[in-house]
Image (cartoon, rainbow, N blue to C red):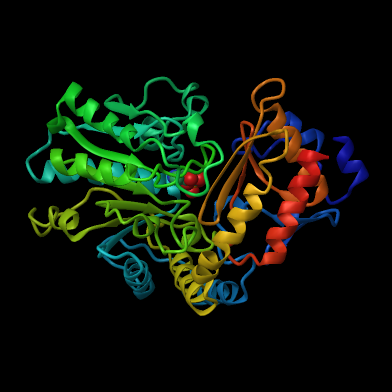
Amino acid sequence: MPDTARINPTVPNDLDSFWMPFTASEMFKDNPRLISKAEGVRYTTVDGHELLDGTGGLWCCNAGHSHPKITKAIQDQAATLDFVHNFNQGHPLAFEAAARVTALAPGFHHVFFTNSGSEAVDTALKIALAYHTARGDGDRRILVGREKAYHGINFGGLSVGGLGLNKGQFGTLYPSTAHMRHTWLPENANSRGLPEHGAELADDLQRICDLHGGQTIAAVIVEPVSGAGGVFPPPVGYLKRLREICDAHGILMIFDEVITGFGRMGTPFAFEAFGVQPDLVTCAKGMTNATVPMGGVLATAAVRDAFRNGPAKMPDLFHGYTYSGHPLASAACIATLDAYRDDQIFENATAMAGPWEDMLHSLTDIAAVMDVRNCGILGAVHLKQDGAVGDAGRAAYNGLWEAGLIVRPVGDALCLSPPLTITQDHVDEIGAKLRAQLAG
Ligand code: PLP
């Protein structure tokens, strides 16, 4: 029996059966952090320690935790229609959820439901490949991603992803990929919002076209603001330049909005905030406020219509999940979108983006801080390396946990993505806790 279980009876005796995701298991067992309650912007651990949730769950609880209307919708749905699949049959709420989601996304009229962001990414990549096949352009097989990108952990997303540690254990995945450089430049350190330098890095896509032939490239996928790799807002003009190159070569543009979707930039989706129209958008997380797993791929009419020319009695896309459009997820999605609207949560994100930026950049005078990045209600305080990469980030994370603030360390970058319901008091509290930890 681990010592912790003897000290604290609320810690399970068996901490080994659950093979935890992305976890250093032995370190976890030495100090098991177990949370048993969530409300608003706060978590409480099994031993009563209160934490401000600076990461909004894992970039996903945009409306704050345990929103009563979302909770009730899930409870009611579980008691009414627990499950029905959507293969050649269906249930009304999935259609209502689809209409509500697409209504938030100008230019998009269709959504394919998945259960996670990773599934949304792999679905989008498959739709892109199948789109070209449907149009008789099936030689387009190359998928282009970017360094430092996180597109989940399934085969497609990992292939186009740009985080070496995530790929290294698995060898070659989808073979036909190419990667653009990341957009983090030293001259952009401590930029407020979008950095000034680096639009020309989008020309990496043109170089890939020159190398392989633009007519062989199916799609390029980027996070409009890269998140889980360390929060890197796009340089001014970068996304527009990418769009132009896609247009010049008939390449589909996929925005992975698993983090940025549902209000994190103030607009429902980031593509609107940046004025760039992609062909496909992946989303998840904030879609149900993370209460019931759900993701989706938004498609334009032009993409969807390419699939309409096959035999009427056959599926137009040989793809789908048992739980695509699950009744509980659909109910949670509709209630979540109601909450975003009724509580004016995206409006709050817009209003708080300035104070959020000010707070983060007030930390640049601290000697341990190397770079501060922000965009919408997203941010990263990147620490100077101290020891091995990740040591400073881990130490700060541990200290902040004790002080009552959850951050997400990515190497030495402390990433922040609190619920979009934050007030000035919360922002001040986060700022004070960061300063005490980093300057203290
Ligand atoms: N895409 C992006 C941009 C993400 O940030 C994430 C998760 O953080 C994913 C995909 C994967 O989502 P999930 O963990 O729901 O599979």
Give the image quarter of residue 56.
bottom right
Residues 2 and 283: in front is 283
Residue drawn at the location 71% of the way across and 49% of the way down:
406
Q: Quadrant of the N terminus?
A: top right
Q: Residue 308 in the image: state x and y as whole percent.
A: 11, 57
Residue drawn at the location 25% of the way across and 65% of the way down:
109
Left/right placement of residue 186 relative to residue 86 reads right
Whether residue 348 is situated above or below residue 241 in the rendered picture = below
Name, please, the residue furthest toward the right: 7
Q: Residue 32 in the image: state x and y as whole percent.
A: 78, 41
Left/right placement of residue 146 relative to residue 387 reads left
Q: Is residue 214 visible?
A: yes
Q: Residue 404 in the image: state x and y as whole percent.
A: 79, 52
Residue drawn at the location 64% of the way across and 32% of the way down:
412
Left/right placement of residue 18 relative to residue 27 reads left
Q: Residue 168 in the image: state x and y as whole percent.
A: 48, 21
Left/right placement of residue 183 relative to residue 387 reads left
Residue drawn at the location 39% of the way across and 59% of the way down:
269
Whether residue 304 is situated above or below residue 327 in the rendered picture = above
Whether residue 71 is situated above or below residue 145 in the rendered picture = below
Q: Is residue 11 visible?
A: no
Whether residue 42 is situated above or below residue 256 in the rendered picture = below
